[in-house]
Amino acid sequence: ATVIATRRLSYRFDVDVRPTHPDKCGGLKPLGDLYFANAWIVLLAGLFVAVWVLMLSLSYASLERYAIEDLSVGEALIDDYPALCSQYLTSGTSPSAEELTAFSPATCDCLAGKVGADAAANAPRYRVLRCIAVASDVQPTTLIYLAMTGLRYYRWLNLYSALLIILALVAIFTFLFPMVNTHRIMRDKGPRFRRKADSLAGEIAELERYIEQYGIVSSEESTEISRRLEWLEDRYQGYNNPPMWPFDARVRFRMAGSLAGMGVSFVTSEIVPAIVRFLRSVFGGQAR
């Protein structure tokens, strides 16, 4: 409702663009700040979700590294744990192969919980990692303990990732939707401002020709002409490059920074783990 109301401002009132205004936004910076305030409400929610996405992704990566490197549990065993635990809980026999020496019945009990063998057989990988850490006799560090706690909510990661994308799109829409008409008005007034800049350029040229032809008689005249040239050149720059958007670099930085933070969280959750597993398989294979 606020976005729609602020969008109507540019339709109901005459937007007076001042190219030489010191806010570098044509005097419309308060309007741009209002547009950003609407988007900031959505961005705050997006950053909150982004923190959860990043925390869950880092928790998963930390426990995976902890299980493989610190507890010496192979990746193959981690993937096979649900089937092995289902067999163990059903028949009571543990795997005897040498490569499965790291198999822990306590991990199976953790995976089974109160449901039994069916829960263990269908346990997702993040639960396997958490149960491996819980069942281990090694005292976890504070970071590993926090990762174990965070992994309780890992099942919501896909939902949080989807919500993160939705919030980013909504924030962009909330920021740009009320601004489109204001931008159109500022863009349409651009040619008129540039014509004004051409007339200022002509006045600057005439003043310079006067100085070349007659010179400067006194210091007072020199000071006055210098001030006049400075004033004309400043106005020329403003009219020749009129602002096209009603927001300044600060708003642009905050908007881009917030979206970048949300994007980094999403990339971390979706791409980085796959890259880490690929590099581990490549360099691990070379080491073997």
Image: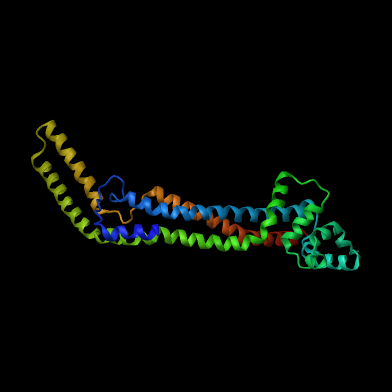
Does residue 190 lie above or below 236 as drawn?
A: below
Q: Who is closer to the viewer here, 135 or 3?
A: 3
Does residue 17 lie above or below 184 as drawn?
A: above
Percent from the top left, x then y, of residue 220? 13, 32
Residue displayed at 67% across by 57% down: 153
Q: Who is closer to the viewer here, 266 or 38?
A: 38
On the rendered structure, is 122 left or right of 12?
right
Q: How is the image coloured?
A: rainbow
Residue displayed at 67% across by 58% down: 154
Which quadrant is the N terminus positioned in?
A: bottom left
The quarter of the displayed image where residue 223 is located: top left
Percent from the top left, x then y, of residue 89? 87, 65
Residue displayed at 82% across by 65% down: 116
Q: Who is closer to the viewer here, 156 or 274?
A: 156
Which quadrant is the C terminus positioned in?
A: bottom right
On the rendered structure, is 33 left or right of 281?
left
Percent from the top left, x then y, of residue 168? 49, 59
On the rendered structure, is 56 left or right of 240?
right
On the rendered structure, is 286 left or right of 193?
right
The quarter of the displayed image where residue 152 is located: bottom right
Kindly tell me whether residue 271 is visible in this rendering: no
Percent from the top left, x then y, of residue 36? 40, 53
Q: Who is closer to the viewer here, 240 or 55?
A: 55
